[in-house]
Image (spheres, grey):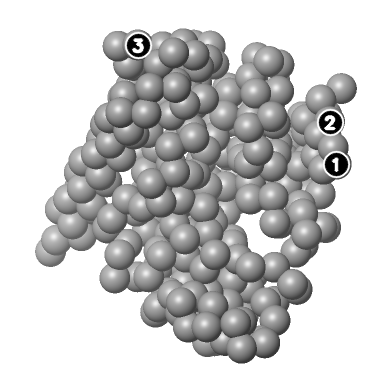
Amino acid sequence: MATHRGGWSLDRRDPHFIQAFQPLWGWLYDHYFRVQTQGWERIPAGQVMLVGSHNGGLAAPDMFMMIYDWVRRFGPDRPVYGLMHPKVWQAAPPLASLAERAGAIAAHPRMALAALDCDASLLVYPGGAQDVFRPYSQRDRIHLGDRQGFVKLALQRSLPIVPVVSWGAHATLLVLADIYPLMTQLHDWGMPWFLGIDPDVFPVYLGLPWGIAFGPVPNIPWPQPIATHVGKPLYFERYGTEAARDRPYVEACYHRVRDQMQRDLNELIAKHDRQSAP
C-alpha cells in the first residue's frame, strides 16, 4: 500500500471505475469537444512523464481528454497517475475522491516517486492553477510557472519527457484577468481566502454556470472544439542523482522542455488557423 501521511493513496485508482466512465468521456470527446488529436504513436514503451499545459479552469477539459486518449490507446491497466494540487483535497473532498479513483494523486514528491516505484507513468501540469486560469490574452503561451521539480524527478529516474499541448480549451471559459495581487492586499487587510485556502490565483472569468465569476470556482465548460498534440519524447544527455542536483543543468533541461512545448503549441495554432481559413 502506498499511502502518504496526508491521507493520499495510490491504491484508490480503480481500473473498473476508469473503464466504466470511458463511454461518457468518449461522448464528450466525439460530440461535445470534437477533439482532434495527433502524435500518440510517439509515446515509447515503458514509463514516461507526460508534461502539459492546460486550459479551461477547474474543469480542465483538455487534461481529461488527454487521459481519455491514454486509456483508449493503452487500456486502464497501463497506469498513468496525474498530479493534482493538494489543496483540492481541502477545498473539494468529494471531487478529490472521484479524481483519485480516476488516477489523480497529490502533487507531492513522495507520491510521484511511489507511483514510479509501481511502474506507472506520470501526467504533470507544472503550471498548476496559474496555468489553467491564465488570461485569455495569454492562451498562446506556455506557462509552467518556472517550476522545475518535474525535471529533477525525470532526471533522477531516467524518464523521457513527452510534451503534450492543446488548443481550444481556453474558449470553454474566458478568463479576463487574474487579480491575485489585489486579493493578496485585501487578505492583508483581513479579508479571508475562500474556504481558508490561498489558491495562488484569483481569476475573473466569463463562463457557465455563473456568467461572471470571481475566484477559482468550478465551472461547466462551453462546448468548444479542442485539438491536442503529443510531441516527440525528450531525452537528456545526463541522468541520475548528480544530474538532478546540478541546478544549471536542471534549468537548461527545463528551458528545453518549455521551448519545445511552445514550438509544438505554435504549430498546433498554425494548423488550426489553416483549417479555419475560408
Dot 1: element: loop
Q: Residues within 10 Å of mark 3 (few under 14, many from 20)?
A: few
| Residue bearing mark 2 | 3
What is the C-alpha distance between the residues marked 2 and 1?
Answer: 6 Å
Residue 50 location (% of width, % of height):
47, 31
Task: Locate the C terminus and report the quarter of the image it occupies.
Answer: bottom left
Dot 3: element: loop
Q: Residues within 10 Å of mark 1 (few under 14, many from 20)?
A: few
Q: Residues within 10 Å of mark 2 (few under 14, many from 20)?
A: some
**Left or right of residue 124, residue 135 in this image:** left
- Which residue type does callout 3 highlight? Arg
Q: Is residue 121 above or below residue 127?
A: above
Q: Nearer the viewer, mark 3 or mark 2?
A: 3
The answer to whether the residues at label 2 and label 1 have Cβ atoms under 8 Å apart is yes
| Residue bearing mark 1 | 7
> In this orientation, which residue lies closer to the viewer: 18 or 278?
18
Residue 9 location (% of width, % of height):
81, 34
What is the C-alpha distance between the residues marked 3 and 2?
Answer: 31 Å
Whichever of labels 3 and 1 marks the residue nearer the N terminus, that label is 1
Q: At x 44% / y 22%, what residue is drawn?
A: 245
The answer to whether the residues at label 3 and label 1 have Cβ atoms under 8 Å apart is no
| Residue bearing mark 3 | 238
The answer to whether the residues at label 3 and label 2 have Cβ atoms under 8 Å apart is no
> In this orientation, which residue lies closer to the viewer: 250 or 117?
250
Residue 136 location (% of width, % of height):
35, 70
